Image (tube, grey):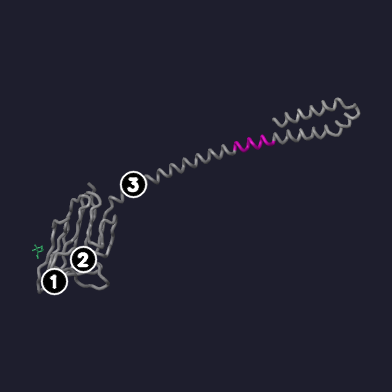
Amino acid sequence: MTFSVWLLVCFCGLTLGQNVLPQTEVATEIGSCFPDMCKFLKEFGAMKAKLETVETNLKEKSEALETKLKEKQEVMETRQKETENQVLELKKKDATNIAFSAAIGGSGSNGHIGPFNTDTTIIYRKLIINVGNAYNQHTGIFAAPVPGIYYFTFFYHAVGTQVVNLSLMKNNEEVVTTYDHKTSHDVADNGGNAALLQLQQGDQVYVRMHANSHVWQNEQITTFSGVLLRQL
Ligand SMILES: *[C@@H]1O[C@H](CO)[C@@H](O)[C@H](O)[C@H]1NC(C)=O
């Protein structure tokens, strides 16, 4: 706009200046200059119109882009919220899915553990399942991650000629026990016990093998299992 005004002023100045010149000279001046100016102005006008169109197009496009981006952002935000909710739900589920089963295992060979002259905690190293990782296969101790009602079992196999004396322990308390006396007429014993326990978070449950007792160990035969039945 300013450019065209400036051009107009320039053009007027040119014609005014020419007024003082002799008539013949004016005619030649206008003849050589005026048509060019006209053409230029015309082209300038066309350029301006084109520029305006480009400007309008650009504006429309950027507005459309902005709308699209906004929509995309909204979709992403909704998705993020959904994911967060799913994670929360999974965490909740994780806390309530507690179950383990383990056998004593062994370093490839069958054999017996014990008898020892002190009480020992049996370490069931061969994991069958350990959902929730509340059982520690390096210590043999299950630690309740949430308060609730839990169910535990422990089964053993042993040589019949030796004593078996095992207890399911809740912290330092003997809950249930299984034992077999020394006999000479049976070669093998199998036994076990089970209990429902109400546990607080952090309570420890494990199997204690009493002094002078033994069990047979391999990948399948002497086991310890537990499951959370209901959270309280
Ligand atoms: C098992 O061990 C406990 C604790 O040491 C003991 O009191 C109990 O007499 C033992 N039972 C048998 C049958 O050896």
The residue singled out by tag 3 in the image is 89
Q: Quadrant of residue 183?
A: bottom left
Q: Nearer the viewer, residue 76 or 183?
A: 76
**Residue count near mark 1 (Cα–Cα under 10 Å), binned few <14, some 14–19, many ≥20:** some
Report if the CB atoms under discs 3 and 1 are less than 8 Å apart: no
Q: Which residue is mark 2?
A: 222
Q: Which mark is residue 138?
A: none
Q: Is residue 228 left or right of residue 50?
A: left
Measure the alpha-carbon separation of dots 2 and 1.
15 Å
Task: Tell me the quadrant of the picture where the N terminus can be found.
Answer: top right
Amino acid, disc 1: Gly
Foreground of the two, 25 or 27: 25
Choose the circle earlier in sequence order: 2 or 1.
1
- Using residue 225 as the reference point, say whether residue 37 is left or right of it: right
Disc on res. 160:
1
**Magenta part of the protein: which range?**
50-60
**10 Å crowding of disc 3: few (<14), some (14-19), many (20+):** few
Look at the numbered disc 1 and give the secondary structure of its residue: loop
Q: Position of residue 171 (x, y in %)?
A: 17, 55
Residue 35 relative to residue 4: left or right: right
Label 3 SS: helix
